[in-house]
Image: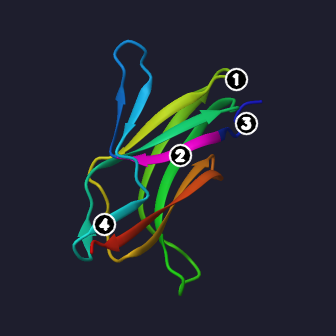
Amino acid sequence: MAGVIPRCPALVLCGRVERDAATRNPTLVGVFQVIEVASFPAGTRPFAVWIQLTNGHGAIGMQVRIAHVRPDHFEDEPVATLEFTRNFADPRVVHEHVGRFENGLYLEQAGDYLVTLTANGIEVARTYLRASVKT
């Protein structure tokens, strides 16, 4: 069963993840799906991606990929990636991972950005991020 692809019940963009000192439960601070900037191109603040994973087995290479999705182009344009490995010893355990984009993103233009999580190259979750000019 080595390398069984996990399920991803949560893929959330947020400013940061804090942990309760007593329970170690996560608190997602500043959850967002829209980034507003004064003008483009623009850099964003650092942020995190909070991920829950379960039903995997063995060591699995994971990747969070952010890409600009343009309606007039067939292929998306990669903006940033984060890679990590998660070892699933017990498929019943729910694992958490916090990916940090410490330098934020550099966005060339407004529009939709696809955030994809893959496990051994297979997509297991996706969400969208919209970038726009603040009005």
Mark seen at residue 4: 3
Q: Disc 1 on helix, strand or loop?
A: loop
Which quadrant is home to the C terminus?
A: bottom left
Q: Nearer the N terminus, badge 2 or badge 4?
A: 2
Residue at the image point whose x is 44% and y is 23% from the top: 25
Which quadrant is home to the N terminus?
A: top right
Q: Nearer the N terminus, badge 1 or badge 2?
A: 2
Mark 1, Cα crowd under 10 Å, few <14 / some 14-19 / many 20+, is few
Q: Which residue is mark 1?
A: 92
Q: Nearer the viewer, mark 1 or mark 2?
A: 2
Q: Which stretch is magenta?
A: 8-14
Q: Nearer the viewer, mark 1 or mark 4?
A: 4
Q: Is residue 4 magenta?
A: no
Mark seen at residue 109: none
Q: CA distance from mark 1 to mark 3?
A: 13 Å
Q: Which is nearer the eye, 121 or 116?
A: 116
Q: Nearer the N terminus, badge 1 or badge 3?
A: 3
Residue at the far left: name it: 38
Q: Nearer the N terminus, badge 3 or badge 2?
A: 3
In the rendering, at what x and y percent does residue 96 appear? 51, 31
Q: Are the residues tagged 4 and 3 within 8 Å (C-beta)?
A: no
In this rendering, the answer to whether 93 lies above or below 66 is above
Amino acid under disc 2 = Leu
In this rendering, the answer to whether 89 lies above or below 60 is above
Q: Disc 2 on helix, strand or loop?
A: strand
Q: Disc 4 on helix, strand or loop?
A: strand
